[in-house]
Every structure is written in structure tokens, then in C-alpha cells.
Image (cartoon, grey):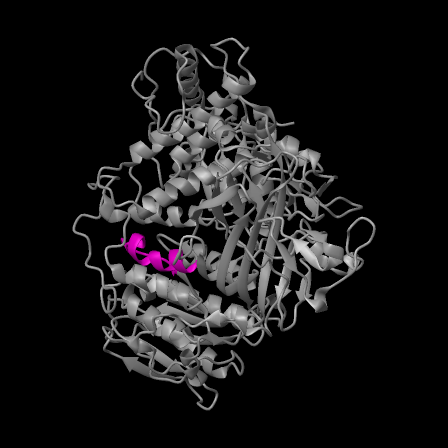
Amino acid sequence: MYAQGTHIPQPPHSAGATLSGFRAHIEPHQIPSPVDSIEDDRVKWANQTYMTLPGSHVPQSTTEFVAIDQGNSSPKFIRVSTWNMPSTSRLAEDLNIPIVAIFQPFADLDDREEPVPLIECGESGPARCEKCGGYVNPWCTWTAGGTRWKCNLCAHETRVESDYFSALDANFARLDYSERPELQKGTVDFVVSSSSDYWASNPPRPNSFYGLADSTLRDAVRRPQKMRYVFALDVSSASVTSGFLASACVALRTVFYGRFLKDGSEAARACLPLECNIALVTFDDALHIYDLSPDHATPRQLVIPDVDDPFLPLPSSAFLILPCPRAVIESLLDSLQQRQVSFPPGATSHSCLGSALRASLAALVHSGGHVVSFICTPPDFGAGRLVPLEHSNRDETIDDKKFYMPRDVEWSNLGEECADAGVGVTMFMAPTKFVDIASIGAVPSLSGGDIFYHWDFKPLRDGPILESQLRRLVTRNTTYNCTLRVRASSGLRTDHLMGNFHLPNPSTPTFGTLDADKAFSVSFTHVASISPHQYASIQCAVLHTTVDGQRRVRVVNLALQVAELAGNVFRFADMDVVISHFMRQCRSILAITRTPTLKLSAIREELTEQCSAILYSYRRHCAAATVQTQLIIPEAFRGLPVYTLSILKSKPLKAKYIDPDARNYHRHKLLGASVRSTMYHLYPRMLAVHDLNDSIALPHPETGIAEMPSLMRGSHVFMRESGIYLIDNEELQVLWIGQSASPQLLHDLFGVDDIFEVDIQLTELPVMETRFSKQVRNILAQRCKEKGGRRTKLLIARQNFDAAEIEFADMLMEDHNNAALAYPDYLSLVHKHITTAVQNGSALSPGASIRAPW
């Protein structure tokens, strides 16, 4: 055991807000800790399998667990804000718990779990309800001797087709039940490639620049095809000099063909899906299209100088090719990579990004696919050109709407057209100045794509991260040409849908691409009472095309118990979903509002009201007999105040100045993030790595599984100057080293004895043959594995010496920072709201006027 030292003072960072007026002293060690709940749940499910039948408590989103599908989908595919549905709208309104479901329909499964069943349907397609269109599932019932089935969503009875008929047994179950996965499993894939009724529709509004696109555009629907990728690279002077272009070329070459060491051994495997066609486009103040057909020894470049009216000068057979044979493509990547060494004459500082995206869309409009763009310079030429803002600096107020809305409708229109065409757009950004993500980011946000943001790009530090992100992009479960529909049983109605998609009508979102990392939320309202003697059902159906060109429908089903008592609703509430919904609600407000008077401060106050309203409802309906001044928090919502405070401190909402591009990037990311990613981003995982025991984070000699260490609370109050701490918010990892850290630990981890000799420019930890080094590197490797192989930037921060300590301090969510209250002060504020409402006998609900007393 190493010397413990003393608690450190609060690290240097921007000041937080103060709570005015009287506040009773609250001991930080005694207030509810989110870490205790996370660790207790992790221990509970470490050696226990989750069975998905209704009526049991669900593992938290932050817990690794194995689920067995018993007719309800795994919580990895769908989570709801309460697993006991309120029976009436009055009960739901009284409790102030939003009725929300968050779907992640293509989430990765544990290796120990069964894969999603694949069901061949033939020409007739899957069995569906004649009235509501719902798909047959384990919760429907069979009547009339098996000739009809009753929909669990609308209660309509539908005739069974002759080729789907089966007689019933004495329990009214089909005799072929064991042979029908769709009647046993909550999540299934129906293959519908042979039925043109399920094929993707051609876009409703083809533009003139689609001139040389395939003639199938004349058809109403198109046959499913394998995924096609267009890679568009910024070759402006900023992209070349920063090394971003060269790093992008290295990443593409590795993804296409792998990487090998000098001795011939494989360092990285090629991972582009087989038989996927690709194309390469480059752009600066002109657009460069490449004929990559193997008929030429070198790539043939066609320059399109008229970027205001771009067109595709090649047939798709010459533009979109297989990546093998590789000579022509490698020749092009080599020439682009060499620009950093021999800077080409006539290189410009301009960008026609909008024109490049339009030309890429023209190539994919007849098939769908994925456009992956690498951007360094703001678009100031061609379609969607943006005039630089005169004052894009710290003099601007954080509520200035021009930073949060697209400045040219061209970008929103382009995003919608991409979604309609089944084309997703992903942007890798390495800006050296303001690029206006609010404008150009509308394209990936509406088409279901990603944004990867690398400010101040450094090739040695950020190049491997870029490569890992690109590798994850092409290897994760990705679908395209997606439309979805969420249906609920009688008594419930879908209300608002929130996520990164295009919404051509209120109930049918359209995604250009939808992948394993993306989630979206749906809120529900009561339109009638629900009987507590039956289940409330939710079904999500995603019609999509797989990377290998198969048309499918993924169906996610959930049946919930119905509760008449407030206590049962709170008992089975899911705080993780509620918090994720709060985040999406805020992101949507920032994304769609055009009201000049709406300010971020009003959104922050509304969040505090929502938090107070939920806790007050529990106090009022489940703990009314307690002392009025006592703070009562339900077990399911013990972490609600600290997570709400974390939302207020998040980059999209924090009151201190944040670069507008960074604010908008995080807004995009959190709007489509999974519940798990959201929770870990809001309250970063923190470890005291100096205090690891001898066996933790090392493979077990029998099972080979390495147990990860327990987390600690995110506050300087629990830190010591002799410690070494690792914090991770899914976007950034910081290794903090105390001034009194043991020289032996430093030697074991870095190979040096003095804290001043630690290389803070390290991008990854050195490989040392010490137990401590292996443990910390195993922890980092496990975190990378949990992200699907996507690496995270690592910073080294020595106490009171390095600028990275500011980033570290801002991630301590319980501290007095980020222009917001410390956790004890915020808990006092929430308590004050509730106590005043209890003493006055007044209502407390979101939107109520509760601010006046303070």
C-alpha cells in the first residue's frame, strides 16, 4: 500500500456558480453517489443472466450483462423510462416521469449472446396486422383454430395466410411454435429482398445534376445492392500543411488493404466489407473526379471547375469500382500523401465541400450508400458557400442564434435529399479555424451519419485515432436506405421522435444510414386508460438494406406490465433513460428553435425544474408521511440530481464560453448517442490507478478474463496528491499525476523516477514489463474494446503544471466548476424547490413558476 498523502485542493479551472442564501452544510461523503449504484449493479449482474420476461428489474445501461431473449427484446435494443407503464394519463402526469423509449436497434451483442434470428419470408413477406401494420410477434394470440391472429397492438384479428397456417394445441399455441423464431424472440430480422413491396423508393425529387445516374431512377423502387462508399478528401492548403490529408490517406490505405511491418507481419488487417464498391473525390476550389477503372495504369483525373453547378462526368461503372486490383487506388493515395512533402503549385486555401457532396450524392442516388468526407477548410466556394462570420470569437454571446442554426438552407436541403436517397454522410473534421458545424453538420445530422471532430490536428497524436474511427465506421453493423415505424398498443400514442434523422412525416423517420452506435428516442402520451390486467406493448420496425445488399426488416418488441400505483411506477423506473431523454430534449430545442428570446439559461432552469418535479412527485405520492424538511430520493432516481447537474455542465449547455463548433459537435453527438455512452459522457468514469491490487485488470489464470477495478466519485474531495487517476468521458482520457506520486509508480508506468521527466506529449503509454504498466494498459485496452475498437485521445496532466489539468478538472462533475454549482449546492437547490412546494402545498411540475422565491 502506497502512502495516502492528503486531499488535494480543487484543481485550477474556471469558477462555478454560487448558491445564494442559507444552505445547510452537506457532507459530500453522505450524499447519494452514482458510483455506488453503478458498482452495485455491476456486481449483481457479473455472474447472473438477465431474462427478458416482464416483471424483473433491468440492468443499468452502464453494466455489462448477458441477456436471454424470452419474447421481449434485450435492453441493449430498447430501454424505457419505466418498466411498469402508468395505467392512466392522470397517473403519468402526477408522477412527472416522461414516458419514453430509447431504441438502439442494431446494437452490438455480447459474444455469449445468441445472434438475432434471421427469417426468410419469401414473396408474401412477414405476417402483418391488416389494421395497424404491426408485425407478428410473441405477444399476439391465435384464434379460430389458428386461422386468425389477434394483434397485441390494436387488438384487430387478421386472417392467417394459407402458407403460414398451423393448427393450435390445447393451450391455443401453434404446433409449429418451436420452429418459428418470430413467435419466440423479441428481436428478429425478416428477409424481404424478394418482395418489391419492401424495396427502397427512389428519391421523390431528383435534381438536374443527377444526369448520368443509373436509369433505374425512372423506377419507383430499386433492387437492393451492396453498400457503396464515396470518400471525399479536402486537398486545400490547410489540409495538406496540417498533415490531415496524409493521415486520411494512410487510414484509407489501411482500411482498404491492411498494414504490414518491415518483417512482413500484419500490423492491421484490411476491413472494408467484401465486394463494396468505392470511389474517391478530392476538392479545393475545384472538384476532382477520378476514373479508377483498372483499364488505366494511373488514375485519370477529371476537373470540374464549375462548382456552382456540379455534375458527374463519369458513368457509375467507372466511378464506383471494387478496391481490387489495388494498383490504381494506391497510386492515387500515394500522390495525395506526397503533397505534404512536395507542396503542389497553385494550391489554394478554398473549399467547395457542398459541391463535392452534391457530386457524391449524384453517384449514389440510384443505389444509396455512404459518403465519407474529410474536411479541414470551411466551404467558401460552390454549392452552399458560407461567408466567414465577422465576429466568430469570444466576443460573441453564447446565446447568439447564428451559431446554432444553418446559415444557408442548402445544407438542410442537402441533408434531407441524402436521407431520401438512402445516403448517409459522415464528416471527419480537422479544422484550423471556425468551420460552422451548425451549417455543414446539418447534412450528417439529417442523413444519420457521424461527425468526428479533431481540433488542432496533430498527425502523430490524432492519426491513429482517425484510423481507428474509420475502421469502426466500416466494420460496425451498418444499414442504409432505412425507414422505421414505432407502434404502441391501444391507449398509447407516439408523440415526439428525437435523433439524427430526417422526418418527412411525423411518424416515419428516414435514415440514410443507421448503425450499431446510433440511438433515437420516442416519447408516448396516453390517449386512453390501459387495463392493469394486460401488457402495454411497443414495437419498432426498421426497414433497411444491409451492407451485403439484403433487404430486411428488424423488428424490436417489448411488453410492459401496467401499474395503477405510483410506487410501482417509481420502483421500476429507469433513470438512465430519463437522463438521456433530458439530453435529447435539450439538443432538439437548440437544433430547431428559431425564437430569438429563448436562451440557454432558460433551458437550464427548465432542466432543474424537471429534476425537482420528479423527486417532488415521489415525495407527494409515495412518502407523504415523512418530515417536511427531509430530502427523500427514490432508489431508482438516487443519481438524478448529479446527472441533471452534469447536463448543465455539458458542453452544449454550460454557461461559460465554448467554441461554437465544439458546442454544435457535442449537440450532434449526444442527439444520436446510446444510453450507455450518454451516461458515461455526462459522469465520466474515474479510477484511482495507483491503488490497484495485485490481481485486478490482469487475466485470470483459469478463465482468462480480466476483472476491471471499481470506479470512484468524480470530485477533488476524494483525491490525494500522492495518487494517479484516470478519467474517461468517452471522448477524452486524462491521466492525472499528483505532485507526491510515488517514484516507483512513475518508474513502473513511464520508465522515469521524477514527475518532471514524464513526457506529457505521449499519445499512448509505453510498454513496460511491470505489473502496474500491464494493468493500466489493460484498462485502456478494455475501454477501447468497449467502444468497438475506437481509440480515445489520451492526455497527461501533472498536478499544477500542465494545461491538460483544466480538461481533467472540468470532468469532475461533483466539483464547483463549468460555471455551475457543486453537487452539494445543487442538491440544496433542488431540496429548496421541493421543501417550498411541500410547505406551500403547491404543485411542482416542469414549466411551473417556481423560480420567484430564489
Whole-percent x, y for residue 321 in the image: 48, 81
Whole-percent x, y for residue 195 in the image: 58, 73
Q: What count of labels does the image hold?
A: 0
Q: Is 442 included in the stretch rendered in magenta?
A: yes
Left of 828 or right of it: where is 852? left
Against 539, residue 358 (above or below) is below
**Residue found 24% across the figure and 42% down from its top:** 595
Q: Which residue is outermost to the right?
A: 170
Q: Which residue is outermost to the bottom?
A: 295
Quadrant where the N terminus is found in the figure: top right
Work out whether residue 488 can be spotted. Answer: yes
Q: Which residue is outermost to the left?
A: 390
Q: Which residue is outermost to the front?
A: 144
Q: Is 283 included in the stretch rendered in magenta?
A: no
Left of 51 or right of it: where is 2? left
Boundaries of the magenta span: 428-449
Left of 824 or right of it: where is 358? left
Quarter of the image where one finds residue 79: top right
Quarter of the image where one finds residue 297: bottom left
Of the pair 179 and 459, the residue shown nearer to us: 179
**Residue found 44% across the figure and 50% down from its top:** 499
Quadrant where the C terminus is found in the figure: top left
Against 191, residue 293 (above or below) is below
**Residue found 30% across the figure and 66% down from its top:** 353
Work out whether residue 734 can be spotted. Answer: no
Whole-percent x, y for residue 850 in the image: 34, 21
Of the pair 86 and 681, the residue shown nearer to us: 86
Whole-percent x, y for residue 186 in the image: 66, 51
Of the pair 716 and 790, the residue shown nearer to us: 790
Quarter of the image where one finds residue 233: bottom left
